[in-house]
Image (cartoon, rainbow, N blue to C red):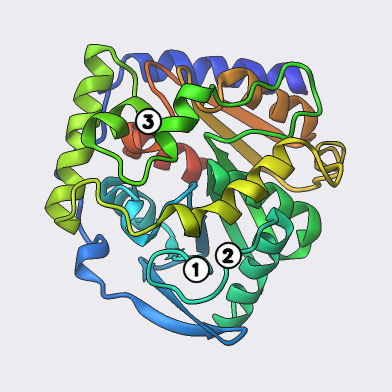
Amino acid sequence: MRKIRMAACILFILGLSSCASTANPTRIGESSNQIQPNTIVVNGSKISYKIIGQGTPLILLQRFRGSLADWDPALLAALSASNQVVIFDSLGVGTSEGEIPNTLGGAADFVVSFMDALKIEQANILGWSLGGMTAQVLAIKHPNRVNKLILAGTTPPAGDKSVHLAPDEWTAVATKPQNSAADMAYLFYTTTVVGVKAAQESQERFEQVHQRGVETKTSPEIIMPQAIGARAYMANKGNWYEQLAGIDLPVLIANGDSDIAFPVTNSMVLHRQIPNSNLVIYPDAGHAFLFQYADQFSDHVNQFLRRE
């Protein structure tokens, strides 16, 4: 079965290589600029969130330092065409109150509390980068709350010698108090003609919708607990790597072929470790492949979610 799934992944790669290299920038549609954030009290803290579209809930878990304003509008438009997309500022991030958990177990528990507050019994979960790590823990600790799992541009713990941690240069840029447009291009895209174009188009979409460019609302003091939690997870404290083999849910793993933060080898380890998983790799793409290939990635997500 694993060989059959890998063959399907290769077909995905070949098919994508002949597609347009970036998402269609005109497909912003009903994106976050047209929907004001709501607030809901979760365990005593006011949490900011938005719900876009209709259908089965698809909860998006954000990257390191990411807030409501850090989802590409093209991705939100593409996903919300077929799903009820739920995005939120987690505890202590962006405009949400509270204290950021310093473990991913705590972050996963908060997702469950957030779902309880919204009266969502079960949802599809899409986690990107740090959000993908949290999504893995969520599926391990609270499997009855997850229908299907999408892990985008993320990594398993270092329980296998093939797992590579982000290089020091990438981490140094990712933790700067403010990131320039050049920093964002380096962190999330390739340096090829295709990658440079994708970075520019995504930045233009952000500026059009949020009118904030690459501004971030998170400070070094706020993000430190996230870094502590991520480091502990990647060091496999809690034996999370071994527990990945017990995930009994359909899982889609996706990444760009040139992700600096979490290279393709990490996604392949995830694919080997999680029994019921499929792997899709996108060509000439980095950590933000899901922005670069918003339409194609959303199509793959929807095909996966529709599959029995």
The total of numbered circles placed on residues is 3
Measure how far apart labels 1 and 2 are at the Cα level: 5 Å
SS for dot 1: loop
The residue to which callout 1 is attached is 92
Image-quadrant location for residue 286: top left
Quadrant in which the N terminus appears: top right
Where is residue 31 shown, x and y percent of the image? 25, 60
Give the amino acid at mark 3: Phe
Image marks 1 and 2: residues in contact by CB distance under 8 Å: yes
Disc 3 and disc 2 in contact, CB within 8 angstroms: no
Q: Secondary structure at mark 3?
A: helix
Residue 100: image tag: 2
Counting residues from the N terminus, which is met first, the one under dot 1 or under dot 3?
A: 1
Which residue appears at 54% of the width and 22% of the height?
167
Along the line of sight, the residue nearer the viewer: 58 or 178: 178
Q: Nearer the viewer, mark 1 or mark 3?
A: 1
Examine the rendered structure and indicate whether residue 151 appears above or below residue 7. Answer: below
Question: Residue at left 66%, top 50%?
Answer: 229
According to the picture, the residue beneath numbered tag 3 turns out to be: 188
- Position of residue 109 measured from the top left corner of the image (x, y, whole percent): 70, 67
Q: Is residue 138 visible?
A: no
Q: In the displayed structure, does residue 212 sit left or right of residue 36?
A: left
Binning the other alpha carbons within 10 Å of mark 2 as few (below 14), some (14 to 19) or many (20 upward) gives some
The image shows residue 262 at horizontal and vertical percentages of 56, 27
Coordinates of residue 207 in the picture (x, y in percent):
15, 49
From where the camera sits, is residue 273 visible?
A: yes
Q: Dot 1: few (<14), some (14–19), or many (≥20) neighbours within 10 Å?
A: some
